[in-house]
Amino acid sequence: PDIVGPSNAAADTPMTRKEMITIMEATCKEMDEKKLQYERMIHALTLEEAAAEAASACIDETISDGAGNEEEEADSEAGEEENDSSGSASV
């Protein structure tokens, strides 16, 4: 059996210029609406990406600050122990 899809053959009467203009204006309007949708999606994704980067930077900074504080505390404790032992040795 032959499978036949919709025909793209021209209508019996050709389109007038006015009809072509009307169809092109409608198509242009649809394209403008799609463009606005894409621009909104791009803007939303850009904001989400910036927020994710900012959150990641805060987490990285918090982690590095926490590690730095631990190292400083360990250094100060080691220094106090040295001071305690040197003080008792001199007595």
Image (tube, grey):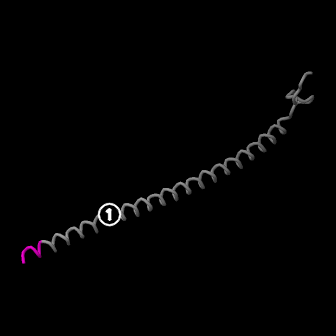
Q: Position of residue 83 (x, y in %)?
A: 15, 72
* Apparent side of residue 75 relative to residue 67 in the rendered image (left or right): left
Q: Name the image quarter holding the C terminus.
A: bottom left
Residue at 85% x, 28% y is 8
User: Is 13 colored magenta in this rendering?
Assistant: no
Q: Quadrant of residue 3?
A: top right
Residue at 40% x, 61% y is 63
Segment colored magenta: 86-91
Q: Position of residue 28 (x, y in %)?
A: 73, 43
Most extreme residue toward the left, as rendered? 90
* Apparent side of residue 1 relative to residue 81 in the rendered image (left or right): right
Q: Quadrant of residue 75?
A: bottom left
Q: Position of residue 38 (x, y in %)?
A: 65, 49
In this rendering, the answer to whether 91 lies above or below 58 is below
Q: Mark 1 = which residue? A: 68
* Helix, strand or loop for disc 1: helix
Q: Name the image quarter holding the N terminus.
A: top right
Residue at 71% x, 49% y is 33
Q: Viewer-proximal residue, 11 or 60?
A: 60
Q: Position of residue 65 (x, y in %)?
A: 36, 64
Q: Identity of the amino acid at label 1?
A: Gly
Residue at 81% x, 40% y is 23
